[in-house]
Image (cartoon, coloured by chain):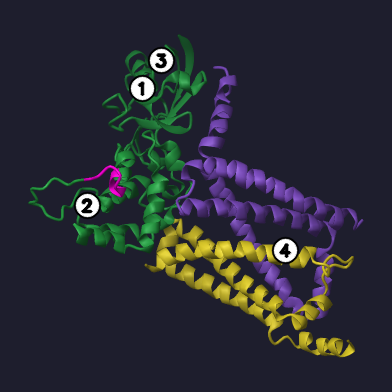
Chain colours: A purple, B yellow, C green
Amino acid sequence: MSSSAGPNANPIILAARKYAWRYVGNVAFWIQRFTGLALVAYLIVHVHTIHDLRDPETFDAALAMFGKPLFKLAEIGLLATVILHALNGIRLTMIDLGVGLTRQRQAFWYFAIGLGAVLFLAGAIPMFIYGILRHS
Amino acid sequence: MTGRAINWYLQRITGAALLVLLVMHFWVEHFSAEARTPTGLTFEIIQRRFFNNHWFVAVDLSFLFIALYHGLNGVRNILLDYTWGVRMKKPITAMLLLLGVFVAYWGVTAFIGNPHLQQISTTITANR
Amino acid sequence: MATYQIKLARSDTDAARHFTLELDSRMTVLDALFIIQREHDPSLSFRCSCRVGMCGTCAMRINWMPRLACQTRVETLNADAITIEPLAQLPVAKDLIVDLGPFFEKWKRVRPALHPKDKDSKQLAIVPPDSEFGRQAQVKRDCITCGACYSVCGITGSNSEYLGPAAINRAMLRLLDPRDGNVDDRLAVLNDETGVWRCHTQFNCVAACPKGINLTDSIMKMKRSLLFPKKFHDKQAAT
C-alpha cells in the first residue's frame, strides 16, 4: 500500500490512508454512535406511528404515506443504518468477550463493511424494485 | 457485581436479543405473505394477526421494551462520555427513564385496551 | 540526503514555523528538531531525554499521529513534508512541550505504586511465566508514560475526568500482582463512572502506543473482571 507512494505524495492523503487502517476503531466508534442515535430517533417516531392503531383511519393514511417512493428510499437508508450498527455491534461484543482484539481492523473492514455491503444489497435491491420501481 | 457492570453486560445481552428479534420483525413486516400485497400492511392485517396469534404482540412488545432499554441506555452512555454528563448523571437518568416510560406507554396502548382493535375484529371472526 | 519541508507548531505567534532541511533518510524527527534548534531558531522548545525510545519524553504529533520523535525516522513518513505538533488534549507549555499534569493526575488516582500485603516479607514473589500475571506483565509492563494514548483517546477528549488507557493498564497489572494488597481502592477507582465503563473500544490508544501495548485488551479485561471482582480478593486470600 505505502510502497506505491513516492516521497512527493501528499502527506495529508498518506496520513488519511494510514488512518483508515490504523485508527479504524475510531471510525467504527463514530459510525456506531451516529447510527445508534439515528435508530433511537427512528424508534420513537416508529412507536408514535404504531400508536395510531388507536385510530385506524390515521394509521392506514400513515402507512399509505410510508408506501411513497421517498419513504421507501428512507427505508433503504434505515436498512443500511441497522446493518452497520448490528454488524459493528457484533464486532464490539466479540471484543468485549476478549475474542479477536488483534483482528479488530479486519473485523471492521471485512465483516462490518464487507459482509454489511452484501447484506445491504441483498435487502436494498428488492426493496428498490418492489417499493420504488413497481410503485411508479 | 455492581450496577455499572450489570448495565454494561445487559447492553450486550439486549444487543444480541435485538439481533434475533429484528430479523423476525423484518421478516414479518416486509417479507411475509400478508405484507407482500400491493397495499402492503394495513390496519386490518394487523388486527387479524392480533387476534389470531398473540405471539405477534408478545414479540412486538418485548422488542419494544428491549429496544428502548438498549437505545436509551446507549444515549445515556453517550451523555456520560462528557464531563458535564457525569455531573448531571441523575437528571439525565431520570429524563431518559421518563422518556422510556412514555414511549413504552405509547407502544403498549396501541395494542392493549385499543377499542378499535377489539370491535372490528369480532365482526371478522364472526364472518369466518 | 533529501530535502524536507518541516512545519512546526509554535506557541509564539511571531516565531518561525517553516523550515527547509537537508536530512539523511536515516535521521529521526528528533534529529531534525535539534538541527532546527542549533542552526535556525534557538528559541524552539521541545523535550527529550534518552533518545532511544525508553523514557517517553519526546512524544509529539508527527504528521497528525502521536509518535516518539526519537523513534520516527523521517523516511518512514513517506512524505517530504513533515508537520510536527504537540500532543493533543493536554495543555501546551511551550511549542512542542505539553504539560503531562492531567495524565499523571489520573495515573495517581489508581495508586500506581505497589502496596505490598506484607511490607517486611523476606520472600521473593514467584511469578510463573504462564500465570495470568506473568503473561500480562510480559507484554504490558513496558509502559513509558509518554501520554500518547491519553492524547488520542476519544473519551479523554470529551470527559476530562476519564482515567485514560495508561492508568487502567497500570491498575490491572497491580491488581494481578500477587504481592499487592490494595485491591479495594483500585477496584473502586476503576468501577467509578469515569473509570473503565467510559471506554468504547476505539483502539486509538493501541494504534498510538509506541511500545505496542494492547491497552484496550487491559481495559476489557478489567470490565469483565468487574463482573466478578471477587477474583482479586481471592488472590489476597490465596497467598
Indicate the secondary structure of the residue bearing disc 4. helix
Per the image, is C72 magenta? no
Q: Are marks 1 and 2 on the same chain?
A: yes
Tell me the kind of residue under disc 2.
Answer: Pro
From the image, tell me which residue sits under label 4.
Answer: B26
Q: Residues within 10 Å of mark 4 (few under 14, many from 20)?
A: few
The residue pinned by badge 3 equals C26
What chain does mark 3 sit on? Answer: C
Q: Distance between the residues labelled 2 and 4?
A: 52 Å
Which residue is label 1 attached to?
Answer: C30
* Contact, mark 2 vs mark 3 (Cβ under 8 Å): no
Mark 4 to mark 3 CA distance (whole Å): 58 Å
* Secondary structure of residue under mark 1: helix
| Callouts 3 and 1 on one subunit | yes
On the image, the x and y values in percent for residue C158 come to 45, 51
Q: Is the magenta stretch mostly helix, strand or loop?
A: loop
Q: Nearer the viewer, residue C9 or B48?
A: B48
The disc, 2 or 3, on the residue closer to the chain's N-terminal end is 3
What is the spatial separation of the Cα atoms under label 2 and label 3, in whole angstroms?
Answer: 44 Å
| Magenta extent | C127-134
Determine the image quadrant of residue B57. Answer: bottom right
Disc sitting over residue C178 in the figure: 2
What is the chain identity of the residue bearing mark 2?
C
Q: Which amino acid type corresponds to the residue marked 1 in the rendered image?
A: Leu
Within 10 Å of disc 3 (Cα), the crowding (few <14, some 14-19, many 20+) is few
**Is C129 within the magenta?**
yes
Amino acid type, mark 3: Arg
Q: Position of residue C126 (x, y in %)?
A: 19, 46
Tell me whether the residue at label 1 lies in contact with that at label 2, contact meaning CB atoms closer than 8 angstroms: no
Where's residue C223, x and y in %? 39, 57
Residue located at (33% from left, 18% from top): C34
* Label 2: which secondary element: loop
